[in-house]
Amino acid sequence: MNRPITTARRSILRRFAAGVLLGLLPLTALAADPLRIGLILPLTGPFASTGKQIEAAVRLYSAKNGDTVAGRKVQLIVKDDTGVAPETTKRIAQELVVQDKVNVLAGFGLTPLALAAAPVATEAKIPMVVMAAATSIIPSKSPMIVRSGFTLPQITGPIADWAAKNRIKRVVTMVTDYGPGIDAEKTFIARFKAGGGEVVESIRTPLRNPDYAPFLQRAKDAKPDALFVFVPSGEGLAVMKQFDDRGLKQAGIRLIGTGDVTDDDLLENMGAAAVGVITSFHYSAAHDSPENKAYVDAFTRANNGMRPNFHSVGGYDGMNLIYEAVKKTGGTANGEALVEAMKGLKWVSPRGPMAIDPASRDVVQTVYLREVKIVNGKPWNVEFDKVENVRDPGN
Amino acid sequence: MTSAPAPDAPRLPGARWSAPEIAFWLLAVAAFFAFPAYRVLGSQILITGLFAVTLDLILGYAGIVSLGHAAFFGAGAYAAGLLTVHGWGEPVSGLVAAGAAGAIVGYATSFLVVRGADLARLMVTLGIGLLLYEAANKAAFVTGGVDGLSGVSMWKLFGVFPFDLAGNTAYLYSLAVLFVLFALARRIVNSPFGLSLRGIRENGRRMPAIGSPVARRLIAIYTISAAMAGVAGGLLAQTTQFVGLDVLSFPRSADLMIVLVLGGTGRLYGGLVGAAVFMIAHHLLSDLNPVYWQFWLGLLLVVVVMFARGGILGGVDALRRRSRGASR
C-alpha cells in the first residue's frame, strides 16, 4: 500500500520541478505565443479609402518581412470601426484587449477615434500606434501612443515658408472647418506672416457636402497671388475641378496647399487640371529612392494598380515601428517596454528618413515641396525641395 | 380559448409583469454571465435600446415621426461629459444632469414639433438635429468640436465600482438605469395619459372633442422622451468616457429609426429587441468580413421589413396567433 503513494508523490514532485523549470524560462514560453496586433480602421463609410490604403500597406509589410519577428509569430486582427462613431472604436479596442489579448493596437483613421481609444491604451498599458489621425494633440493623450503618420502643422509650415520666399505676397486661405483644417490655417497664417506675406482672406468651408464654387469665386474676387487650400483626404478632386472651371488659373492665381489636395490616390483622376499645383507633404509616390520604387511597385502590383498614398506609408511605417521595437526588446510582450523601444527609433521609409521623437512620441520626418507634373503621361507629385527633420511645431 | 389580446391593448398602469416580460429581463441579466467577453458590446446595446424606447414613446405611442432624436441624446451626452471634464465625475448625478439637458432642449423645441403634420415634423426634427450638430461643431472651445470631448474621467460608481475595461460596471449600470426608465415608460404608456396619446395617434382631430388637450399632451410626452434620451446619451458618455460630435449626428437618428422599426413600434420592447438584433448582427457580420458586411446587414433589414410586419415582435405575434388558430 505504501508504494503507489510514494510514486504519486514522486510524480507530483517531478511535475513541480518541471513547473519551476518552465517558470525559469519565460522567454521560451513567450516564443510560443503569437504577437497579436489589433488593427482598427475605417473600412466602410466616408473614410473607407484611408482604411483600404493602410490595410493594403500593412499586409504588404508582413508579406515582405515575414510573419515572424524575434521568434514570435505575428497575428493581425483587422476590425472595421466605420470611421464615424468613436464609441465603436473604443469598444473594439476594449474587446481586442480583453478578448483577443492583443499586444499592440494600431490604425486609427481620424482624430476623435484615436482620442476615444487613448484611455484604453493607457489603462491596459498597450502600445497604440496611430497611423493616420493627424491632429497635433494626439500623442499627449496617452503615454502609450506613438505616431507613424504625420501631423498637419508639421507639413503645413514648409509651404508657408516656400510661398513667402517665392514672390507670393497676398494669399487667400481656404480650409475645411474642423480640427485639422483649423490647425492648417493657423500654422499657415503664422508662418506666412512671419515670412513677410499677407493673408487677405481666410475662408472656411463646411465639412459636410461642401460646394466649393462660391468659396472659390470669393477667393478669385480677392485677387490674391495664390490660394492656399487644405481639404480632407478625398476632397481634393472637387476643389481641383472647381478651381479649373472658375478660371482661377487664368486669372493668375496659383494653387498651393498641403499634399492632401493632390492625394496620390486621386491624382490620376485630376489629370491636367492639377499640373503646376505646389504642395508640401511628407510622402509622394514619385519620391525618388530605391526603397520607394520597390514599395510603389509592390503596392500597385498587389492592389490592382492602386497607387499608394500618404495614409499607406503611415500603415507601412507603423508596422515597421512595431517589428523593430519587438526585435529590439527580444520579443517581449510588455507594452511599456515596447513603447520605450519605439522611442528614438530611426529608419529609412519609402517616404525618406524618419524617426520617433523620444520626448513626444511623435514622428519626425522630412517634408518635401512638390509640384504636379506629367511624367510618362500621368500626373505625379514631383519633389523639388525638402526640409529635413521637421517636428510637430506644437511640441 | 380566449383570443390573444391585440399587441398594444392597454393594460392597467400598475399591471403585473407578465411571464415573457420577466423572462426578458432575466435574459438580460443572464447575458452578463453567459457572455463575459461581450459586456462592453452589451452595455452599448442596452444604451441603444434605451434610446430606442424613448423614440418609441413619441413615435409608437404619440405618432410623432422624428429624424432628429439624436439632438437630445447628444445634449445629454455633452451635459454628462462636460460635467466630468469640469471636475464633477459622480455618475448618478451626472445622469440627472443629462436628463435635465435633454428635457430642456426637448421642451424648447416641442412647440415647433407639435404644430405640423408628419412631413413637417420630419423636416423640423431633422433641422433641429442639424442645427445642434453645427452649433456643437462651432463651439469647439466648449465641446472640442470634431476632435471630440476627451478627458471624461468618471469617479467610481457609488464610490466602489470603477468603470473597467471589461465593461462589468458599464453593463450592470446601464442595465439598472434601463430597467428603471423602462418601468417608468411602461407605466406612462399604460396610464390614462398614455391612452390619450394613442387616441391622438389614431385621430388627433377628434381628441379635443372628448376633452383631451392635444398640444399639451404632445409637449409633455415629447419632453419626457427627450429627457430619457438625454439620460441614454449621458450613459454613453459615462461608460465610454468620451463624447464625439457624432452623438448629435444624423446617422445616429436614422440608425435609431431602423432599430425601432426592426424591433417593432408601439410596444416598448420593440426598441430593445431591435437594438439587440441590429447591433449583434452588425458585430457578427463585420467580424466575418470587415469590408463588405454592410451588404448583409442591409439584406437582413429588407427581409425583416418585408416578411415581418410590425418588426420582429410583430412577426412573433403573428406566428403566435397563427399557431393558436391552428390548434383551435
Image: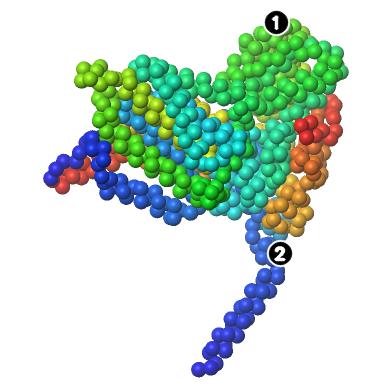
- Specify the color scheme: rainbow
Up-down relation of residue A126 to residue B72 (above or below): below
Quarter of image, res B228 = top left
Depth order, front residue of B290/B54? B54
For label 2, the SS is helix
Q: Residues within 10 Å of mark 2 (few under 14, many from 20)?
A: some
For label 1, the SS is helix
Residue plotted at (66% across, 27% down): A179
Q: Is residue B162 visible?
A: yes
Q: Kindly identify which residue carries mark 2.
A: A27
| Residue type (three-letter) at the residue carrying disc 2 | Leu
Residue plotted at (49% across, 38% down): B93
**Separation of marks 2 and 1 at Cα, in angstroms:** 68 Å
Q: Percent x, y for residue A11? A: 59, 83
Residue plotted at (61% across, 46% down): A120
Q: Percent x, y for residue B105? A: 46, 24
Q: Mark 2 lies on which chain?
A: A
Q: Which chain carries label 1?
A: A
Up-down relation of residue B241 to residue B200 (above or below): below
Q: Percent x, y for residue A317? A: 73, 42
Depth order, front residue of A329/A266? A329
Q: Is residue B167 visible?
A: no
Q: Kindly identify which residue carries mark 1.
A: A221
Left or right: B321, with A139 as reference point? left
Up-down relation of residue A290 to residue A326 (above or below): above
Up-down relation of residue B261 to residue A329 (above or below): above
| Residue type (three-letter) at the residue carrying disc 1 | Asp
Left or right: A38, with A337 as reference point? left
Count of labels in the image: 2
Q: In which quarter of the image is the N terminus of chain B?
A: top left
Mark 2 vs mark 1: which is more N-terminal? Answer: 2
